Amino acid sequence: MGLDARGAAETSDAGITTGCLARRLGVSPTTLRSWDRRYGLGPAVRDEGKHRRWTPEDVATVQEMCRLTASGVPPAEAARIARQRPPTGAALRDALRATPAAGGRGEPERSVAAPSPAVPHHESEAPSEHPRQACVGLARAAVRLDAAAVQERLTDAVSTYGLIGAWEKVMVPSLRAVGRRWESSGDRYIEVEHLLSWHISATLRHVYVTSTLRHVPHAAPPVLLACLPGEQHTLPIEALSAALAELGVPALVLGAAVPTETVVAAVQRVGPVAVVLWSQSRSTASLPLARHLAATRWGVRGARTQSLVMLCGPGWSRPTEPGLTRPAGLSTAVRMLSSAGSA
């Protein structure tokens, strides 16, 4: 991938400028200068009267600094470890163990943070600071376009909170935070949102595949999941299918922008125990289709049955009609569908 004209002008054999590095990492030039002044994490090459140049070694040190502060390590300690590149696992573990909870004196510098999403607190859950810190770290890694760190944080979130907890506490809030940053920056962060979405999808599908392989297939009717015509947002139904797979509930996922006739034909062919229709906006929600599917019956004469139709996503208004239901979130949807599958 080539550099644009501005990037090419700021890059030379001697290294890159502070402005170019700041854009690459998703931090401000002021933050880089502050780290240089406070912790000595500055460029090795300082030509008199010219822009300072950051060598690949300098860049690697600052990238490590970003990764450590996003993990909750206090800046001074993060700088000490970053200068020891590559840091030992023991040193990083010790630094994290000694770090106060987010919001205390060890909180990372605000100048590097991506927007920090608020996460609802429930008494039965771990303290809200922990998932919030996970959101901040994930958003920062995405802004830096650090694919390895994004995937590592997503994997850690699933391991720590479980799939549903990771989706509700980390993935969705981080997507919203990155989306807000994109909307407020004049379309400058589209690549960040795409990177984060891709890795979330990869994480969800990995859970789906590994969970499916653990369960013995059976002949129970599946749950059918589909996005409405024109609807391209598939991550929510990928999360739902992965959560169902963990419970051994069979699912048939049709994906994005499924034509109306295709959904109807699939329902008539497989006789699903439930149909999940995802709509992100009112422009894609189709109540006539939902009503038609709720009224569709199959089976032998005298014992015909029909599917539960579940309307998911912000595009739907709350249904008041029989045969249609609208769950409040992923955990509610999983509970309802697992009960429907075992009935």
Image (cartoon, rainbow, N blue to C red):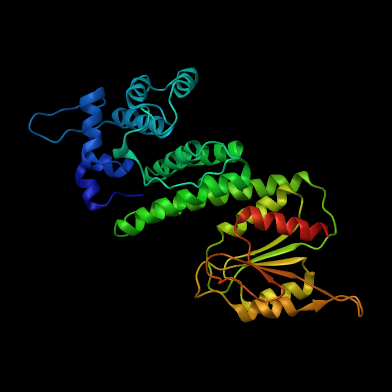
The reply, left or right, for residue 306 in relation to residue 310 is right
Q: Give me the residue at 41% from left, 22% from top.
A: 86
Q: Where is residue 119 in the image (x, y as percent from the top left)?
A: 48, 46
Q: Where is residue 9 in the image (x, y as percent from the top left)?
A: 19, 46
Quadrant assignment, res 235: bottom right
Between 221 and 266, the residue placed more toward the observer is 221
Residue 106 visible in the shown view: yes
Q: Is residue 109 above or below residue 41?
A: below
Q: Is residue 167 above or below residue 156?
A: below
Q: In this view, does 214 lie above or below 39?
A: below
Quadrant assignment, res 264: bottom right
The reply, left or right, for residue 71 in relation to residue 185 is right
Quadrant assignment, res 341: bottom right
The reply, left or right, for residue 196 in relation to residue 249 is left
Q: Give me the residue at 65% from left, 46% from top.
A: 207
Q: Where is residue 343 in the image (x, y as percent from the top left)?
A: 83, 60
Q: Give me the residue at 42% from left, 41% from top.
A: 136
Between 330 and 246, the residue placed more toward the observer is 330
